[in-house]
Structure formats: structure tokens, C-alpha cells
Image (cartoon, rainbow, N blue to C red):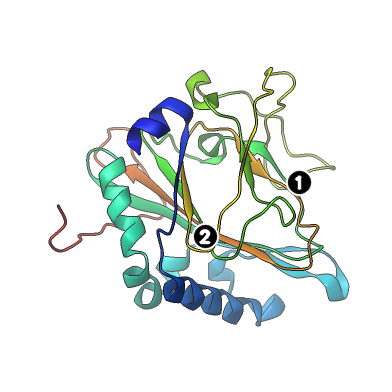
């Protein structure tokens, strides 16, 4: 898999998580969403839509706020993190995306490294589908081999797109786009410079996904505001 990431910038792993684990994770996110605007600020919640149509868009710092729930359920992801990131891997980001039916909007193309406050050589992002992720409900899309270009210039967030800086594909002459449709429990791994985004949810069902980011804590440039060190017994 590491060879695929080095060659194209990403790799898909089917059935990484078992269905019962995926269901438990969805239930935990349902619990958070049921709080509405009262979601604790320690989750750094983002919302989308207005009035009665206002829905939870994103929650962060999941394992740091509820380690008892998440740590054992993340084991398959943590094992792959150990195998894909050199040195001493640590989990530095754990968040969920709650792209609501008919409300969840486009996520513009970007590189993860460009959005981070710190430089993370060798970092790998892991996005896991917790529901079916399709073209209709806004699946991940990306540009194969874009990671080979290094970090690109990003346009600043603006009135039309407020969430984060983004890459202009046209000015960077990117025309090759892959659509990554996933079933619940499937995962896609990508390089920190892989250019990716996601579409609008135009379906009647919510699209939910979870992301984990691993970085090498032994690197001389390493610094992370959130860091989760882990040891997996009998890991080979």
C-alpha cells in the first residue's frame, strides 16, 4: 500500500473496519449531533445550514475527548499508521465529517499539509467511510500524482468558500480526477500533498466519514498541539 501512496498519492483499503464497529462509531456521532448547538466546545464543532436546517458539519479531537470509546475501535487504523509512517508515529488529528443530506456542501480541493499549522514530513491521512460514500452524497475526489508537485499555492478562503484555503485546479493544470466511492468500513489513505476534496450531498441520506492523521514524532521538525502516542501489544 505504501508503494501505491508513493506512486499515485493515495490507496484504498476495503473493509478496514468491521460493520459492528462502524455502527458503534455512527451511534457515537449520532449522540453528539443530538446535542444540537450544545455540542461541547472541546469538540470544536462546525455547523452548516441555517435555522431549522442547521446541521453539524464537523467535530474534532474525538479521541482526546473520549479515549475510552475510541482507542480500542481505532486499532485497525492505528496498526496501519504504524506501518505507513516512519520513525515514531503519533496520531495528531482525529475528526468526523457529517455531510448532511441536502445540506452538506462542497469541500474545495486542497492539500492537508497546506491547512496545518506545522510541517509534518511523511504524514499520512486516513479517511474512513462510516456510511456509503458515493457521487450522489459527496464522496472524496482527488488528483492522482498531485503529491509529486510538492506543496502548492492555495487561494485564501473567501465569501464564496469560507472553510479553508483551496487549490485552483485550472491554474495548476490538473485535469485528471479520480472519484473514490466507498462502502461503510472502507478507507482511503493519502499523502500530505495529495490534492483532494469532496462533492455536495444532493441525496436524501447523510454521508459520514472519519479522518485520522499520523505523523513521525521523531522528526526534528515535529510539533503537534494534539498528539496521541500508542503502543499495540504483539504488533509485528
Residue at the spot 33% in from the left edge and 60% down from the top edge: 76
Picture coordinates of residue 16, whole percent (x, y): 40, 58
Residue at the spot 54% in from the left edge and 79% down from the top edge: 27
Tell me the element at label 2.
strand
Frontmost residue, 23 versus 218: 23
Picture coordinates of residue 150, whole percent (x, y): 50, 22
Q: Is residue 228 visible?
A: no
* Position of residue 121 in the picture relative to residue 199 (left or right): left
- The residue mark sitting in front, 2 or 1, is 2
Frontmost residue, 113 versus 84: 84
Picture coordinates of residue 79, whole percent (x, y): 28, 55
Residue at the spot 50% in from the left edge and 40% down from the top edge: 117
Tell me: residue 146, above or below residue 215. Answer: above
Q: Residues within 10 Å of mark 2 (few under 14, many from 20)?
A: many
Q: CA distance from mark 2 to mark 1?
A: 19 Å
> In what quadrant of the picture does the N terminus appear?
top left
Q: Residues within 10 Å of mark 1 (few under 14, many from 20)?
A: few
Frontmost residue, 4 versus 106: 4
Tell me: residue 141, above or below residue 25. Answer: above
Answer with the quarter of the image where residue 53 lies.
bottom right
Residue at the spot 25% in from the left edge and 38% down from the top edge: 86
- Residue annotated with mark 1: 162
- Residue annotated with mark 2: 95
Amino acid at each position: 500500500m505504501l508503494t501505491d501512496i508513493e506512486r499515485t498519492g493515495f490507496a484504498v483499503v476495503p473493509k478496514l473496519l468491521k460493520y459492528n464497529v462502524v455502527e458503534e462509531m455512527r451511534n457515537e456521532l449520532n449522540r453528539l449531533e443530538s446535542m444540537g448547538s450544545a455540542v461541547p466546545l472541546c469538540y470544536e464543532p462546525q455547523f452548516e445550514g441555517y435555522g431549522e436546517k442547521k446541521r453539524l458539519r464537523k467535530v474534532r479531537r474525538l479521541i482526546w475527548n473520549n479515549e475510552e470509546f475510541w482507542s480500542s475501535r481505532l486499532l485497525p487504523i492505528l496498526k496501519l499508521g504504524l506501518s505507513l509512517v516512519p520513525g515514531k508515529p503519533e496520531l495528531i488529528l482525529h475528526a468526523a465529517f457529517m455531510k448532511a443530506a441536502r445540506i452538506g456542501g462542497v469541500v474545495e480541493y486542497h492539500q492537508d499539509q497546506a491547512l496545518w499549522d506545522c510541517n509534518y514530513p511523511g504524514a499520512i491521512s486516513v479517511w474512513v467511510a462510516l456510511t456509503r460514500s458515493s457521487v450522489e452524497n459527496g464522496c472524496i475526489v482527488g488528483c492522482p500524482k498531485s503529491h509529486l508537485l510538492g506543496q502548492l499555492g492555495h487561494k485564501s478562503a473567501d465569501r464564496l468558500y469560507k472553510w479553508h484555503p483551496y487549490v485552483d485546479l485550472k491554474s495548476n493544470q490538473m485535469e485528471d480526477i479520480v472519484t473514490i466511492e466507498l462502502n461503510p468500513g472502507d478507507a482511503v489513505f493519502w499523502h500530505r500533498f495529495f490534492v483532494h476534496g469532496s462533492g455536495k450531498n444532493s441525496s436524501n441520506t447523510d454521508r459520514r466519514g472519519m479522518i485520522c492523521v499520523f505523523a513521525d514524532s521523531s522528526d526534528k521538525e515535529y510539533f503537534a498541539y494534539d498528539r496521541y502516542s500508542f503502543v499495540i501489544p504483539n504488533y509485528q
